[in-house]
Amino acid sequence: MCSQELLGFDRPLELIRHTHRRLEQRCALMQRLLGHLNERGCDADARATAGHIVRFFEEEMARHHEDEELAFYDAVVEVAPSKNRSTIAKLVVELRDEHERLQAVWRDVLRPQLTAIMEGRSQALNREAVDRCQLLYVDHVEREEQMLLPIAEKRFTREQLERLGRGMAERRNEPYPGGA
């Protein structure tokens, strides 16, 4: 059973926060993997850890970005107080741009290196890319949680929460709690 099922798509804002915590854990795991590779090389633990990180970013983070870009961001802008709406809309543009930069670091550097580690073909992992990924995500998550989630928690209706949760379930081919 996946973590989303345990948490429940009927609580989509909590699921977003939960994914952020898991992201922070995976970034910390990449940092620990750097040390492990230096000390022990590309052993079975390193290969398993790399595989775990790759699966998380390829599956969970890909769906998370879709959740935010296809549903969450626009819904927050829509319900933002009129005095803050233009600021929130600009932030959303920045966050979408950051998704592109983060995906480029993942696609161009980290995924190929972690895949090679997972397959036992290499023990090279670019420290600068790991650090950059972690720093970008920490800032990104902080702004989402400080600026967007409070608006959503305060202003989303039950219908908006259900629509967001149903979309999240659909993107994962999972049932929404309570059926149709």
Image: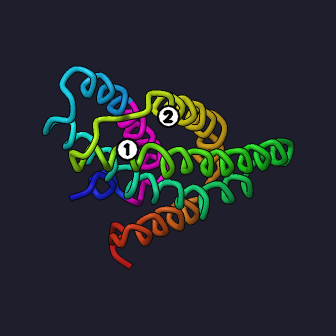
Please give the name of the residue rendered at 21% of the width and 42% of the height, measured from the top-left corner. Answer: 47
Q: Which mark is residue 113?
A: 1
Residue located beneath label 2 in the image: 129
Q: Which residues are magenta?
A: 9-27
Q: Quadrant of the C terminus?
A: bottom left
Taking depth in this image into account, of 179 and 175 the one nearest to the observer is 175
Going by the numbered disc 1, the residue's amino acid type is Gln
Residue 142 locus on image (x, y percent)? 58, 32
Residue 130 locus on image (x, y percent)? 45, 32
Which of the 4 image quadrants contains residue 75?
A: bottom right
Residue 26 locus on image (x, y percent)? 36, 37
Going by the numbered disc 2, the residue's amino acid type is Ala
Query: Closer to the N terminus: mark 1 or mark 2?
Result: 1
Question: Residues at badges 1 and 2 in contact (C-beta under 8 Å)?
Answer: yes
Q: Is residue 94 above or below residue 29?
A: below
Residue 73 locus on image (x, y percent)? 65, 54
Q: Is residue 123 above or below residue 159?
A: above
Q: Is residue 150 magenta?
A: no
Which of the 4 image quadrants contains residue 48?
A: top left
* 116 left or right of 42 in image: right
